Image: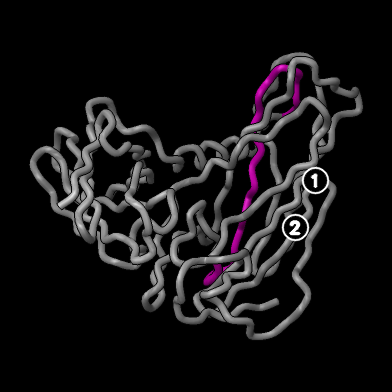
Amino acid sequence: MVLRMGPKVGRRSSWFLAGFCRVFSAAAIFVASFAVAGRAVPIQHGTLDLIAENSWIAPGQSFTLGLHFKLDPGWHIYWKNPGDSGEPPQVTWQLPQGMTAGDIEWPAPTRMMTSTIMNYVYDDEVLLLVPMRASQSFAAPQSGVKLDASVRLLICSKEMCVPAKAQLSISLPTKTQSPMPDKSVAALFASARAHLPKPAPAGWQFSWNEKQSSLVLRARTGRSIASAYFFPLDDLEIDYSAKQEFAPSAAGFQLTLRKSNQLTKPVSRLRGVLVLADGRAYLVDVPAGGPGGNRAGS
């Protein structure tokens, strides 16, 4: 199925972008699969690989897997909150008993503006990290273990979107000693971690207040900040396509975020990722009326 990009009409209502994309033509959803670790799967307009940071798995130890996307020029996938349209990749795991998967760790995205539509995306190449855990009682067979993932995603250009599915597998040996990193992918995992949002530096203080048509985020950083952009984690709180008004000061900055016209209740917590001009990304989580928070109607 190929979805052509149409005008924005309300919120995203399903994985097929009801209210945003109109069906242009119907075809089978692209399905890719592989069962051998270390080989990328072809997906429409790119490849997808399931890779492991460590060379083996040990009972009672945590480890990290990565979903490695390489996308053709002009095509993109979506961040955790995709913005005005789109859907992020979704993963269903099939794991041996005693093994669990955590939530995807999302690098800071980039902005993509098309007409009046703002999306938060990844293009070119991205590694999405997934923390895993083998319990202490995990029965590790000598032959190793096979981990399976069903990935559902939406791959888009500025003109159209293609929904796709991929069946991924990786086989890893098991040992009793602590795992060693796989040197062949060490640089890739290190780069992915460098792009994950970090807690704000010690001494930084955030507050915000709610006005009739906007949310005003203030940051005291102890120094001047050249520019910043706020990527909200919660949907339908701010108008994604509206300009974020940045006002620097000697000790920090103020960022005015226009409210979404679909916001139906007061914002109780402002959560998101703040990206500075130099690319550094910080987590923001400020409760209404709580420590570090400030909400007052006007």
Q: Which mark is residue 166?
A: 2
252 left or right, relative to 8: left
Image-based side of 208 in relation to 114, left or right: left
Please tell me whether mark 1 sits on a helix, a strand or a loop: strand
Q: Residue furthest left?
A: 250
Q: Inspect the image, locate mark 2, and give the three-letter code of the amino acid beneath it.
A: Ala
User: In the image, what residue occupies the spot 29% across and 60% down?
Assistant: 259
Residue at which label 1 appears = 169
Query: Taking 136 as reference, is 34 above or below it?
Result: below
Q: Is residue 67 magenta?
A: yes
Mark 2, secondary structure of its residue: strand
Relative to 223, residue 262 above or below:
below
As drawn, 180 above or below 261: above
Query: Would residue 217 be counted in the magenta stretch?
Result: no
Q: Quadrant of residue 165?
A: bottom right
Q: Residues within 10 Å of mark 1 (few under 14, many from 20)?
A: many
Give the x, y percent position of residue 280: 34, 43
The reply to whether discs 2 and 1 touch (Cβ–Cβ < 8 Å) is no
Q: Residue at x 23, y 57 (%)?
A: 214
The type of residue carrying mark 1 is Ser
Q: CA distance from mark 2 to mark 1?
A: 10 Å
Q: How many marks?
A: 2
Q: How are the residues colored? A: one colour
Q: Position of residue 284 (x, y in %)?
A: 34, 39
Depth check, front residue: 243 or 54: 243
Looking at this rendering, what residue extends furthest in the bottom direction? 24
Q: Residues in magenta?
A: 55-75
Point out the residue furthest to the front here. 265
In percent of width and height, residue 298 lies at 15, 52
Residue 94 has which mark?
Answer: none
Viewer-nearest residue: 260 or 66:
260
